[in-house]
Image: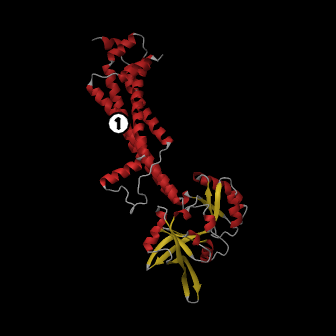
Amino acid sequence: MFQPLAGFIGWRYTRTRRDDQFISFISLISLLGTVLGVAALIVVMSVMNGFERELRNRILALIPHGFVEARSGALQEWPQLADAVAGHPAVKAAAPYVGGNALLGKYGYVSGAQLWGIDPRLERGVSDISRHVVAGDYDRLQEGGFGIVVGDILARQLGLTVGGTVDLMLPKVTVTPMGLFPRQKRFTVVAIFQSGSTLDGSTVFINLQDAQRLFQLGDSVSGVRVAVDDLFKARTILADLMPQLEATTDSELVARDWSATQGSLFQAVKMEKRMIGLLLFVIVAIAAFNVVSILTMMVNDKRSDIAVLRTMGASPRSIMLIFLTQGAAIGLAGVLMGALIGLPVAFHVGDITAAVERALGVHVFNPEVYFISSIPSDVRVGDVLAVCLVAWLLSLLAALYPARRAAQVEPAEALRYE
């Protein structure tokens, strides 16, 4: 089978057992550095992707992908607006809401919360709150019942149980002959939800009509909650909808996607992923520097061979390709071995961690402290290919200098003392 001469010789040099034990040792260290770097990067980036996925699934289970609100805070023509939003091909559902800040008080303890007045039936299309109920009955959130659904963290903080009551106060006042009093109402806890995120300690839901009475909005609402097919295109979809929506109402509208309220959290996770990836790439870079050392010593060891090849008609370019082939082969071997180690670990990192926890009797993530009890992992093909490609290119680039040195060897000088 025909093979290019330079590549064939470079491949032979790579496979040949070396008499110099020091060069063999450095070669092994370089290979192990590339293997460990690639494996560590694949595992860590998969774990960071897993954390990002968990945050997205948990938080966006309660927070819709977008909101269309009236700048004045009261939207009267919301049925027409909701129909126009739901008519967009990229929108899955739309539901009205009344939102604002509130204080919840019980037994002398007070806690702030984000209050959402929702229609229980329509809300199923834009969020998964009903699926995260762990106690009580979500369907009891009926008009006039003044029921409330609270997060489990908030329930523990205030000592709330299903069937109990809690006083809800708004940052608004009611003018009476006796003076100014804060607007408040006693609600009955009908359900407790658990999403496994910080929203469990800061979010409550009441019926839409009860919220309209509480905020004195009449038949108006604050806006419409929107669920789209692709949450990462929510901003684009809402921007595309705005001209049509503004034509359906006289109110001045404002569109916000989920990144306006939760985007900073996801940006922080992405930044951590980039920084950790950059730090771990240092391992691969160090391994690449070792390739420089290996090939430089190899060039010195093979000076006579290089001289013979030059006298037989080999061009400087062919000599360069010999040692570039060695660098590429070392990098490819390290990348493949790193991927073969890193991928199984990345796919089963949760099971491996659980086994270590059982063996040592410790908890990496205490479920009483953290929102997750195991290490999540999300292996993405794009990330794996990027890690492998960059690691291989670093090894190839590291071989350029020794290859140029080899190409500059003068045959007569190299063979003078042979």
Of 95 and 313, nearer the camera is 95
Q: Position of residue 99 (x, y in %)?
A: 58, 69
Q: Residue at x 39, y 35 (%)?
A: 337
Callout count: 1
Residue lying furthest right in this view?
247
Q: Residue at x 31, y 12 (%)?
A: 415
Q: Residue at x 39, y 23 (%)?
A: 323
Q: Which residue is mark 1?
A: 33
Residue lying furthest bottom in this view?
177
Of 22 and 319, nearer the camera is 22
Q: Amino acid at mark 1?
A: Gly
In the rendered view, tell whether residue 405 sits above or below residue 283: above
**Relative horizontal placement of residue 289, taking residue 264 as reference (left or right):** left
Residue 410 shows up from this direction: no
> Quadrant where the C terminus lies?
top left
In the rendered view, tell whether residue 362 sits above or below residue 31: below
Q: Position of residue 266 (x, y in %)?
A: 49, 54
Mark 1 crowdedness (10 Å alpha carbons): few <14, some 14-19, many ≥20: many
What colour scheme does the image use?
Answer: secondary structure
User: What SS does tag 1 mark?
Assistant: helix
In the rendered view, tell whether residue 142 sits above or below residue 275: below
Residue 414 shows up from this direction: yes
Q: Position of residue 71 (x, y in %)?
A: 63, 66
Q: Residue at x 34, y 53 (%)?
A: 357
